[in-house]
Image (cartoon, rainbow, N blue to C red):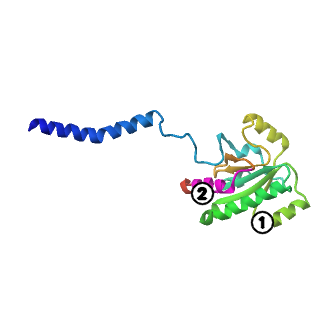
């Protein structure tokens, strides 16, 4: 009888212990992990603080403090009036609208090296509520050198967190649904902005 109780105890230990050991072994050795990330953009490591860009508004005032407290979709371009820029600005507006009740937590901006002109007035009529910032070409070059050309490619879309860090970049052909998924995930888990 004692032998039967011992066998039953070992059988129960085996039934419940082996799956735990197998799971630990698989996790420790990286089995079943694809290595894929769930984000659709490129995470910038380390993130770049937007204050280092010394952005100015149309009145030539520094705007670093205006960028804090919200998530920003920022489009950096040298030609804001070309067809590709118009396309991306449209997607930025649609992505912000698609965030629904979190729409007030998201803002959008265009950053360019050119001064505003009458042509920009047309742009702002077409995309109301968008901020416009100016950066010097020298500052873009300095930042590209500092980040080993991993960030701040002209004609790209960037995600800026509420603390003012440029944390993610997207290629020109990035699908808007992927950008929206990333933004929704960040808005869901973020306690700031």
SS state under label 1: loop
**Magenta residues, start to end:** 173-187
Residue at (30, 39) in percent of width and height: 17
Q: Quadrant of residue 192?
A: bottom right
The image position of residue 144, as x and y in percent, is: 77, 37
Which residue is the site of mark 1?
A: 128
User: Where does the N terminus fall, quadrant-wise?
Assistant: top left
* Helix, strand or loop for the magenta stretch, by majority: helix
Residue at (77, 43) in percent of width and height: 153
Q: Is residue 68 magenta?
A: no
Q: Is residue 14 above or below residue 39?
A: above
Q: Is residue 92 above or below residue 39?
A: below
Q: Quadrant of residue 181?
A: bottom right
Q: Separation of disc 1 and disc 2 at Cα? A: 22 Å
Q: Is residue 68 above or below residue 148?
A: below
For the residue pair 37 and 165, the one nearer the viewer reads as 37
Q: Is residue 2 above or below residue 169?
A: above
SS state under label 2: helix
The image position of residue 2, as x and y in percent, is: 10, 36
């Amino acid at each position: 009888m004692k032998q039967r109780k011992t066998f039953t105890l070992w059988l129960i230990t085996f039934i419940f212990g082996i799956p735990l050991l197998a799971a630990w072994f698989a996790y420790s050795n990286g089995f079943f992990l694809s290595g894929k990330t769930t984000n659709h953009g490129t995470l910038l490591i380390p993130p770049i603080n937007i204050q280092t860009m010394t952005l100015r508004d149309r009145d030539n005032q520094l705007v670093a403090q205006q960028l804090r407290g919200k998530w920003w979709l920022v489009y950096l371009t040298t030609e804001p009036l070309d067809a590709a820029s118009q396309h991306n600005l449209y997607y930025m507006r649609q992505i912000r609208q698609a965030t629904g009740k979190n729409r007030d937590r998201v803002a959008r901006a265009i950053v360019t090296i050119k001064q505003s002109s009458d042509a920009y007035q047309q742009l702002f009529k077409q995309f109301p509520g968008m901020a416009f910032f100016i950066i010097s070409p020298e500052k873009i070059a300095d930042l590209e050198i500092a980040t080993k050309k991993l960030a701040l490619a002209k004609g790209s879309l960037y995600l800026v967190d509420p603390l003012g860090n440029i944390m993610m970049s997207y290629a020109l052909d990035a699908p808007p649904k992927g950008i929206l998924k990333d933004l929704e995930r960040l808005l869901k888990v973020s306690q700031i902005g």
